Image (cartoon, rainbow, N blue to C red):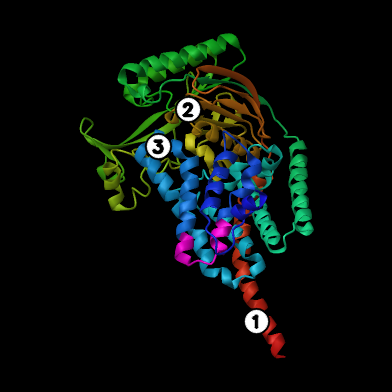
Amino acid sequence: MISRIHSILFPGPEEPTWKLMIVGALCWVLSYPPFNLSFLAPGLLLPVFAILTGHKSHLRKTGEFYLYLLLAHSLTLYWICFSTFAGGVLAILVNPVFMLFPVLIWLLTHQWVSRRYQLFYLGCLWIGFEYLLSLWELAFPWMLLGHSQFLFSWVLEWASAGGVWLVSFFVFLSSWWLWESGQSHQKTGNWSRSYLMTGLAGFLFIMAGGWLLSLQPVQEDGSVRAAVIQPNVDPWAKWDGDNEYQNLVQLTGMTRKAAETDSLIQLAIWPETAVSFYLLADRGRFALDDIRLLSAQTGIQVATGYPHVTYFDDSTLAPPSARYSRIQNRYYLHYNAATLIDSGRSQIPYGKMMLVPFAERVPWVDSVPFMKDLRFNLAGLGGWGKGQDTVVFALSGQDSIRFPLAICYESAFPHLIREFTLRGATVLAVITNDGWWGHTSGYSQHFEFSRLRAIENRRWVIRSANNGISGFIDPHGKVIRKSEFWTDDILIETAGLSSGQSLFMQWGHWVPVTLLILGFLLIPIALFSRLFVKATIRD
């Protein structure tokens, strides 16, 4: 039995890898939320190593690698199709293609690197491209290696030093170690003591370092008493004209109830597109007035998501993605937006900057002419405009309470949340609508990402989700309070305010950048070493 398992996990260069591909895909699923069996993470890359080191053509290796990631994506991200089927299928089919970039580079150049370090070279490329692929318009940074470690809080603590990329690198190292140990056992019939000691030392280093990081206190410069409103409105029905005002009545009623429960509440956070009116346009003025009245009567300032619209009186200024309104006789863009409302100030809108490819916006629609036609061919998918700048809100009269309103998918982007924090955010807020996916793995996976953002920036995260999961997360990623999924709820908690900077905030994305540089340096180093050896032999 043991020998059969060993042959599946560590196939020889001539043996088929399909059984290992199934095992690896199951490791992706089970190490991710909601299962969080993080100890299975070393198995994530075993199929990749087996495929790439096998005696096959580059074309076949590329094909098998794509099939493996396609299987892993399909089993882990199946829930995307519950919101927009076409967008979900595209995401599952296309995202594995992008990870072919580091693999193709490795296939074409690994022979120039010392055999001992060829797989390490692959790891440098892998982590580097995890980061690079999070920066463009097709970004979907969901299937990161580091997202497999939510069970181990001490491992996650390292994100405060190097972001999720450092956690991903640790997962790669564990997979590399397991593969090399298995290959050694296959050759000798025994488990190498040196490999076992190396693995133990690495495990103790990561856990001890994470434990020490968890002991570091986070200096707080004050606090905010906040209420999270989870209305549990059907994400599809909320846009029905008959329900729009009723939804607003429910939100204001729940906020008043929170104020009656706790008179110290300073801020109420409503979910993504909680208000389905164009709140800051003339036709949404009545809703804005209702919220201002709520703020005046309770003393609570309200942060909410809503759809924002911008009109272009000069058609030459309208981007290609703009739509034309026959009623208004002008072009317009609408945004998935958020703002902060009190009893008096004019509102500053924040437009969501990181939009789900195809589901919310067709990539490069303003730059590539035919992409506009693709949007309409996809039955209207990709209709949101793209926000142009980050916004950090401050409570009126309490400037120390500064926070962004990261919208939904944006919480998956370390660089964006870091930018908010560098611009003065003392607490982080995430508003989202995860009900599109129903009772699937999607909402629990998305919730866990907020834990990483809290650790990376050493800030409290306040999360408001339409159907759940809402919650409060402290700067060490500990969930202090959270709601159940698909229930209406009000969560009240005091969140600390921090102005300090974590190592990740100071140094940024040094881990993937360093690994990319190191990876490409391995090539000239290896070539120079070979030339030096040849010259020595001649002499």
Instruction: Say if the magenta span includes residue 326.
Output: no
* Count of marks, rendered view: 3
Do callouts 2 and 3 mark residues in contact (Cβ within 8 Å)?
no
Helix, strand or loop at label 2? It is loop
Residue in the foreground of this view, choosing between 171 and 292: 171
**In the rendered structure, which amino acid carries the disc numbered 3?**
Cys
Q: Is residue 296 visible?
A: no
Kindly identify the residue that appears in the image at 54 percent across and 40 percent down: 29
Q: Which residue is mark 1?
A: 531
Q: Residue at x 59, y 42 (%)?
A: 147
In terms of depth relative to the viewer, which is nearer, 431 or 102?
102
Residue stretch in magenta = 48-62
**Could you give the CA–CA distance between mark 3 and mark 1, rounded to whole angstroms?**
54 Å
The label nearer to you, 1 versus 2, is: 2
**Is residue 9 shown above or below 397?**
below
**Viewed as shown, does residue 154 lie left or right of 404?**
right
Query: Quick check: can you spot residue 421?
Result: yes
**Residue that label 2 marks:** 439
Disc sitting over residue 72 in the figure: none
Q: Which residue is the extreme one toward the bottom?
A: 539
